[in-house]
């Protein structure tokens, strides 16, 4: 064949339809090759066109890979036509569209499949009662935390405890630095001074420090720190009281075991598996089981005491609690199943849908769908013992102020002591100044900072007087007729009286 060309056919059922042509001259096209032979060849991507293709399942959506045929029929999905808890599945009467949490999860998962799955939702139910179906999950939310022997640590988070303890040590060290040179309570052997730092810092927790602060800077730091301690201790006491009160107000029913032993009446959702599960598996008499049809029935029965508790699936409980904040879920999970989509046995879709749902869970899309339909509407954050904990974010402002005050006090103190050391250093004998090195100056500064302020002043004054005495003894001028010895010099007065000068 000089110019080979082929017709492209789309097989639909028992027939076919022509959707274009192919030739080695023009490639794919909807125009017969004979017409294109009269024109310059054009093999650009934009010119490669065909008429619309009807894929298996009578869809024009291009498949993303291997196509699940289903004998050319759409996948029919049965969904319960619920009269309550419509956030999970409901029908919009104006558009006849079905939407809800379960529908969004299914659509998000099926869109991740590598092939198209034509489907349609089929409602079943009498529109008066929730339809009954066999395989569902019963997962009871458990937010209760047992009080432990270390409950006194619960009011603060770990970071709050760590920062608070660190500040007790920091403030104790800062006060010691500010008071060490002028306060005898902060002087002594190194071991005693270290114990004083620890004792003074942590005794401020109870305002029981016995050491008095003398310096102005020390008192300023202590006042700010005592204010911080007052706020922290008051908050700790209030939080611990709240935790213990919540624990004491915990319901007597703590789980399915205590509920069964209590002989109280138990509510369940109409059409749920809970009735058979409680009666057949847990041997609860039917006389104790009360059918309830809606969240409003749940709330009314619990408020009036008609039932002591309601046993239902986790999603229904979460949605109920989002509207009725005065109730809570207690107990541990006593089943480990989960909600799912039922397929015929050996259906190829089952494995692919499971993989797709896992992908939704990993990329966070499943949680977004959950938050869209089952988020808390009428309630604030769920209250629990852990939510009563005070974290560092609540007190960082106080710690920041205290830290800034400590830093300013230390800067002022070191500026002052450096200035005093310079004055003290200038009063030293000149030869010693010339022969001193930087390391010796640092040693002298540390020694000066460690000495009590009065001692350094008296020693400096004594050295100054000795220096002046030596100068006077060597440099006094000698006048005629005068007598001199080591004690001083004597001169004759104008009236013949003797006058004496002593260093």
Image: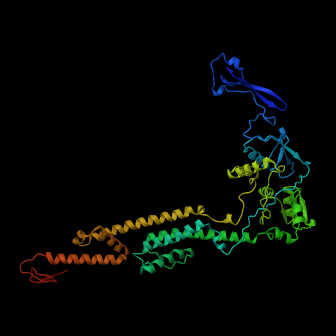
For residue 287, side relative to residue 379 (left or right): right
In the rendered image, the vertical position of residue 101 relative to residue 336, given as above or below: above
- Residue situated in front as seen by the camera: 282 or 321: 282
- Residue situated in front as seen by the camera: 207 or 79: 79
How far across and down, in percent of the image, does residue 115 sit? 74, 41
Quick one: which residue is furthest to the right in this view?
A: 287
The residue that appears at 49% across and 73% down in the rendered structure is 172
In the rendered image, the vertical position of residue 76 relative to residue 249, given as above or below: above
In the rendered image, the vertical position of residue 446 relative to residue 115, given as above or below: below
For residue 463, side relative to residue 338 (left or right): left
For residue 168, side relative to residue 2 (left or right): left
Quadrant in the rendering for residue 433? bottom left
How far across and down, in percent of the image, does residue 336 sit? 78, 61
The quadrant the C terminus occupies is bottom left
Quadrant in the rendering for residue 91? top right
- Residue situated in front as seen by the camera: 458 or 491: 458
How far across and down, in percent of the image, does residue 424 sit? 30, 71
Quick one: which residue is furthest to the left in this view?
A: 480
- Residue situated in front as seen by the camera: 46 or 159: 46
How far across and down, in percent of the image, does residue 81 sit? 87, 48
The quadrant the N terminus occupies is top right
Give the mark count.
0
The residue that appears at 69% across and 22% down in the rendered structure is 4
């Amino acid at each position: 064949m000089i110019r080979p060309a082929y017709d492209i056919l789309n097989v639909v059922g028992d027939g076919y339809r022509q959707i274009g042509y192919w030739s080695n001259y023009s490639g794919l096209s909807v125009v017969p090759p004979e017409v294109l032979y009269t024109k310059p060849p054009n093999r650009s991507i934009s010119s490669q066109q065909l008429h619309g293709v009807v894929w298996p399942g009578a869809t024009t959506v291009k498949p993303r890979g291997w196509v699940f045929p289903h004998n050319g029929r759409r996948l029919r999905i049965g969904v319960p036509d619920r009269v309550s808890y419509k956030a999970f599945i409901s029908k919009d009467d104006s558009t006849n569209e079905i939407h809800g949490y379960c529908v969004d999860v299914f659509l998000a998962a099926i869109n991740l499949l590598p092939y198209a799955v034509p489907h349609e939702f089929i409602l079943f139910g009498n529109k008066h009662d929730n339809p009954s179906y066999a395989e569902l999950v019963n997962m009871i939310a458990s937010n209760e935390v047992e009080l432990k022997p270390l409950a006194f640590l619960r009011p603060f988070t770990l970071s709050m405890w760590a920062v608070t303890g660190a500040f007790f040590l920091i403030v104790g060290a800062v006060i010691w630095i500010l008071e060490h040179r002028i306060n005898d309570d902060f002087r002594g052997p190194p071991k005693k001074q270290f114990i004083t730092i620890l004792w003074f810092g942590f005794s401020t927790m109870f305002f029981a420090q016995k050491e008095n602060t003398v310096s102005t800077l020390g008192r300023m730091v202590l006042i700010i720190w005592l204010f911080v301690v007052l706020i922290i201790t008051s908050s700790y006491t209030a939080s611990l009281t709240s935790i213990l009160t919540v624990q004491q107000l915990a319901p007597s029913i703590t789980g399915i075991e205590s509920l069964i032993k209590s002989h109280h009446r138990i509510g369940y959702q109409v059409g749920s598996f809970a009735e058979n599960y409680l009666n057949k598996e847990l041997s609860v008499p039917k006389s104790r089981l009360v059918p309830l049809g809606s969240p409003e029935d749940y709330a009314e029965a619990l408020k009036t005491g008609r039932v002591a508790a309601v046993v239902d699936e986790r999603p229904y409980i979460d949605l109920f609690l989002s509207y009725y904040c005065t109730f809570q879920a207690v107990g541990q999970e006593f089943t480990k199943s989960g909600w799912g989509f039922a397929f015929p046995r050996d259906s190829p879709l089952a494995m692919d849908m499971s993989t797709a749902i896992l992908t939704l869970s990993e990329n966070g899309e499943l949680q977004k769908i959950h938050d869209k339909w089952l988020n808390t509407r009428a309630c604030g954050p769920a209250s629990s013992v852990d939510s009563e904990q005070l974290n560092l974010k609540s007190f960082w402002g106080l710690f920041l102020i205290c830290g800034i005050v400590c830093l300013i006090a230390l800067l002022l103190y070191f500026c002052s002591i450096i200035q005093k050391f310079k004055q003290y250093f200038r009063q030293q004998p000149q030869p010693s100044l010339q022969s001193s090195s930087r390391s010796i100056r640092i040693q002298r500064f540390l020694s000066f900072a460690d000495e009590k302020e009065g001692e350094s002043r008296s020693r400096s004054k004594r050295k100054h007087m000795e220096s002046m005495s030596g100068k006077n003894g060597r440099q006094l001028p000698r006048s005629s007729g005068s007598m001199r010895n080591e004690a001083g010099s004597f001169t004759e007065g104008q009236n013949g009286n003797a006058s004496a000068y002593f260093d």
